[in-house]
Amino acid sequence: MEIIRGIDKDSVKQSIYGALSTIAHENGIKVLAEGVETSEELAYVKSRGQTWLRDTCLEN
């Protein structure tokens, strides 16, 4: 399952990502978001405290 693709519009993906991100941050683990493709996806992961990105290619 691709968690990041369409996360800005999918409440199930938001719940999964939010839970995993919270658990990781509470335990001092850095989270890497891979495959961020739109500015909306980027805004969402950044709103969850995400700072590490990989294979990011934003649309124009």
Image (cartoon, rainbow, N blue to C red):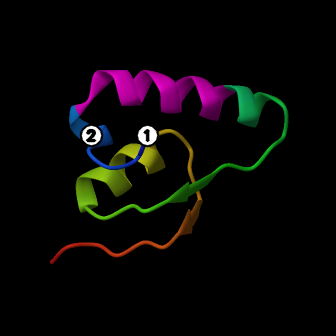
The C terminus appears in which quarter of the rendering?
A: bottom left
Neighbour tally class for label 2: few under 14, some 14-19, many 20 plus, Cα within 10 Å: some
Q: Relative to 48, is 9 on the left or the right?
A: left
Name the magenta segment's main secondary structure. helix
Could you say where residue 58 lies in the image, as x and y percent from the top left? 29, 72
Q: Nearer the viewer, mark 2 or mark 1?
A: 1
The residue tagged 2 is 8
Using the rendered view, name the quadrant where residue 6 is placed: top left
| Residue drawn at point x = 74 percent, y = 50 percent | 30
| Residue 45, image x, y percentages | 45, 47
Give the residue displayed 39% in from the left and 61% down from the top: 36
User: Which secondary structure, mark 1?
Assistant: loop
With respect to residue 9, does 60 lie above or below?
Answer: below
Residue at x 41% of width, y 45% of height: 2
Can residue 52 be found in the magenta stretch? no
Residue 18 is covered by the magenta coloring: yes
| Secondary structure type for disc 2 | helix
Q: Residue at x 31, y 64 (%)?
A: 37
Q: Gap between marks 2 and 1, in whole Å?
A: 15 Å
Extreme right residue here?
Answer: 27
Where is residue 35 drawn, in percent x and y?
43, 62
Q: Residues within 10 Å of mark 1 (few under 14, many from 20)?
A: few
Where residue 23 sits in the image (x, y, percent)?
Answer: 72, 26
The circle drawn on residue 15 is none
Q: Which mark is residue 1?
A: 1
Magenta stretch bounds: 10-22
Left or right of residue 32, residue 9 in this image: left
Judge by depth and name the residue closer to the eye, 36 or 1: 1
| Amino acid of disc 1 | Met
Q: Is residue 13 left or right of residue 17?
A: left
Of the numbered discs 2 and 1, the one sitting upstream in the chain is 1
Residue 41 vertical position relative to residue 14 in the rendered view, above or below = below
